Amino acid sequence: MERLLEATARAEQRHFWFRGLRRFVRPLLVRATEDYHHPDILDCGCGTGTNLGVLADYGLSRGIDRAWAGVRRARAAGRHVGQATVTHLPFPDARFHLVTSFDVLYCLDSEDERSAVSEMFRVLRPGGRVIVNVAAMPILTGNHSVLAHEVRRYTAPGLRVLLERAGFAVERITYTNTAMLPILVPLRLMQRALGLVREDDEDAEREMQVPSRPINALLNRMLAVEAAFVRHVDLPCGSSLLAMARKPAAGGPG
């Protein structure tokens, strides 16, 4: 996991995928926080804390991560981060207006996955929202899955069921990174045919390296166009799933 954090820290400012994620998420952040003045926001599994800088544009952000290496990096950057697990959040009930989780749930076994979503529900205020991003489409399992410790890749119906069973009312769910599928599908199929790398193999870490400047710029532009489209339309396939769900208001059906 520490190798993953180190690779992420080197890539997340410039890599087209991380920049695309932030573009996809921002419209949901606006919607989730527009009714509050300085909302309290928790990022579950915040890694190196980079996304806390984005969340700070919308409220008072803090994060938790189980890996001390990530907590240390985040604190060095001035982020408000504590060491904890997503299955046992160290906060009272109804503490936050918004809870986020970016690419964490797919690393958990089924029991911990359910516990994490239940904990997010518990610490949200009635009427508050959760925003989650997860890996999608099992056909896309590949070398990156090894480095990211993927236990599963999701489908939209499966993610919806997970959230609804915890008590959430799903407001938006869409695939993203659809523009990448013509590249990713044959690449991941080839990787599986050749045999997936081991976690300690240098090839696994290459999955997180920033592409050459022209390629990174091209892919970044492709995802920028897609993000503008996703503001208005839910996409039917893609390498990631992005969802926003609401905790029912007290005394109401949500």
Image (tube, helix red, strand yellow):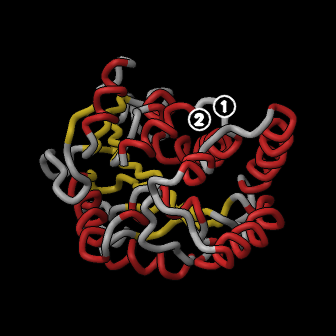
User: Label 1 crowding class (10 Å Cα cut-off): few <14, some 14-19, many 20+?
Assistant: some
Residue at 66% in and 46% down: 17
Label 2 sits on residue: 11
Q: Determine whether, in the image, residue 46 is placed left or right of residue 203.
A: left
State whether residue 76 is above or below residue 122.
above
Q: Quadrant of residue 49?
A: top left
* Nearer to me, 32 or 88: 88
User: Label 2 crowding class (10 Å Cα cut-off): few <14, some 14-19, many 20+?
Assistant: some
State whether residue 10 is above or below residue 106.
above
Label 1 sits on residue: 14
* Nearer to me, 243 or 88: 88
Q: Is residue 27 visible?
A: no
Type of the residue with mark 2: Ala
Residue at 15% in and 45% down: 91
Residue at 55% in and 31% down: 10
Q: Is residue 161 visible?
A: yes
Q: Determine whether, in the image, residue 29 is placed left or right of residue 182.
A: left
State whether residue 222 is above or below residue 171.
above
Q: Secondary structure at mark 1?
A: loop
Q: Position of residue 121 (x, y in %)?
A: 27, 61
Q: Position of residue 172 (x, y in %)?
A: 56, 64
Q: Determine whether, in the image, residue 99 is placed left or right of residue 83.
A: right
Type of the residue with mark 1: Arg
Q: CA distance from mark 1 to mark 2?
A: 6 Å
Quarter of the image for the C terminus: give it. Answer: bottom left
Q: Position of residue 41 (x, y in %)?
A: 35, 39
Mark 1 and mark 2 residues within 8 Å of each other at the beta carbon: yes
Q: Position of residue 20 (x, y in %)?
A: 68, 44
Numbered marks: total: 2
Q: Secondary structure at mark 2?
A: helix
Q: Quadrant of residue 59?
A: top left
